[in-house]
Amino acid sequence: MLLTMSGPQDRQRPRIVIVDDDPGHLQVAKIILTREALAAELHLFEEPIKALEYLESGRVNLVLLDVGMSQMDGFTVLERIRKSGPNQGTPVIFLTALRETETILRAFELGAADVLGKPLISPILIARIRAILDTQDLQRQLHQRNEELEASNRLKDEMLSICSHDLRSPLSAIDLICQFLQEERSKHSKAVLVNRILNQSRLARRLVDNLLDLNRIEEGMLVPTPSFFRIRDLIASSADDEATMMQARGLRLEQALPEENLLCFADREMIAQVLRNLLGNAIKFTRSAVSLSTRMSGAENPTGGAIEIAIADDGPGIPAEELPTIFEKYRKGDQRSLGSGLGLFISRKMLELHGGSIAVSSVPGRGARFTLTLPNVFPVTAMPDLSAMTDGHVLVLSASKQNALLLEGILVEAGLVHVSKDWSAEGAAGRPLPQLVVLDAQMPQREILEQILPRFKAAHVRPAWLLMGNEAEASALLPWIESDVQRLATPLNPLVFLKLAETLLSERGAGSPALQSAPLGVVRGV
């Protein structure tokens, strides 16, 4: 008989088999297990032979086995279970009315997990079954964890092997070139040899950078520090960094740079590393030339657009079957087997941290093309100039140092000088009250608002508020703030932030002759 039940153990789908030639005992056991929902499947057998046939067909989690059956005793059944089949290691609890020491000892000698007396005592049976199922869950988790650790160790061993190989190559080249310089027996000039040393050292540096960033990615510590910069300048300087290596190999770089007036809001060093990784790959595999092109989309959008940067080579290309996994960690294709397999993985992760993406296309024998898409790019003319807000005092509040510096930096970059800090009773003495408060909704709100709001009310000042955070975080603060509130969604769009700040300050008449400047800074907690 099969009984299917639902309960808290369903997730692991435990299957329990009960073997007893006494129908009354079977019903008692069934009632106890059903009431407690201890199994997802409960299989009841009065005939030991049929139970053995079933146990040969698949693995179960637990067997409750009567000792004194007429057809075949429980000891014989257990011996046959242990000889072969999928349940050789399955826990078995003996049920017996016999209390002799010999019976109990023989049960344990045969490998029984426990021996329970008849008639069954419900709390004891439940406790023993739960203990065995819990132990199985722990063993399953431990086994899974061990497999994960073994896989991680294999990957680390592979990484160490790859990296030692990759580092040995440029270091050996540098060593050989230095010998040539020392002995003055090279047909090349010293300038050419020095350039080659520089190229090899850059290869080694790129590998070390990738390893450090991989560690930060796996520990969740890779966090962008965005700022405003001209994207054309960054692309041009990244290409210049690789120029000597290309010249040494007689390669051409065909560039189509973006317009000069495009600003990007991103972590400059991260994006530069992505470009170096992609250019380095292209140089490694190309035959004659590397092309770099850009395309801007959505520049006219009030919230900014995105820029596509494509880097292509004319090398052997990438087989179609390797394209779906090309951005995985340690992935190295047959054609592109000279690197550590980290550069593309790290590039993808860095772009994702910026809300960007990377894609690849390739025709075998005709090269590969990598295209990265980076958001938060807009013309310089779209950026509001807050320098006219000469009395536009802004208070920025965040318990996160990273968010505080980010918000402060955006406002200061746009020309606003009155960004206040230290809004304590002592630090605020004599300081003009803010016309705009930018509040990071992730911070502990009650303490900081209890400190600040009474000062606003006492001075009859109702500043506008900008709340940065998701819907739930911002909504939790609204009952505290009796003033105009605008929500600033995350992830932060700097252009939206600046335009909102400009609008709110304009509504409050900021722009009169300059007052004495408050110190630059930001409140970073209470």
Image (cartoon, helix red, strand yellow):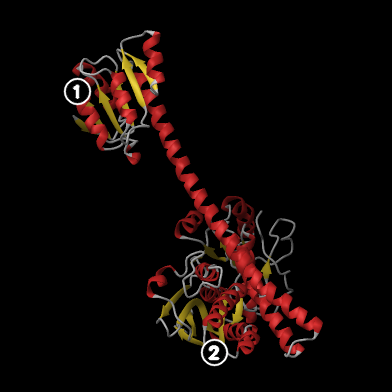
Residue 268 seen from this side: yes
In the figure, is residue 483 to the left or right of 68?
Answer: right
Few, some or many residues within 10 Å of mark 2 (<14, 14–19, 20+): some
Q: Judging from the image, what secondary structure is the residue with disc 2 in?
A: loop
Q: How many marks?
A: 2
Q: Nearer the viewer, residue 307 or 61?
A: 61
Where is residue 67 drawn, in percent x and y? 29, 16
Residue 26, compared with residue 7, is above or below; it is above
| Residue at the (69%, 72%) spot, across then down | 171
Where is residue 404 drawn, in percent x and y? 63, 64
- Residue labelled with disc 1: 47
- Residue labelled with disc 2: 257
Where is residue 386 drawn, in percent x and y? 61, 79
Q: Judging from the image, what secondary structure is the residue with disc 1 in?
A: loop
Residue positioned most to the top: 100
Residue 396 seen from this side: no
Task: Give the CA distance from mark 1 to mark 2.
Answer: 82 Å
In the figure, is residue 23 to the left or right of 484?
Answer: left
In the figure, is residue 399 to the left or right of 189?
Answer: left
Type of amino acid at the residue the image marks with label 1: Glu
Instruction: Tell me which label, 1 or 2, sits earlier in the chain.
Output: 1
Residue 377, compared with residue 50, is above or below; it is below
Where is residue 452 drawn, in percent x and y? 63, 56
Few, some or many residues within 10 Å of mark 1 (<14, 14–19, 20+): some
Q: Disc 1 or disc 2, which is closer to the eye?
A: 1
Q: Nearer the viewer, residue 11 or 158?
A: 158
Residue 215, compared with residue 366, is above or below; it is above
| Residue at the (58%, 86%) spot, across then down | 232
Residue 442, compared with residue 520, is above or below; it is above
Q: Nearer the viewer, residue 431 or 334?
A: 334
| Residue at the (48%, 45%) spot, across then down | 145
Q: Toward which corner of the image does residue 106 lie, by quadrant?
A: top left
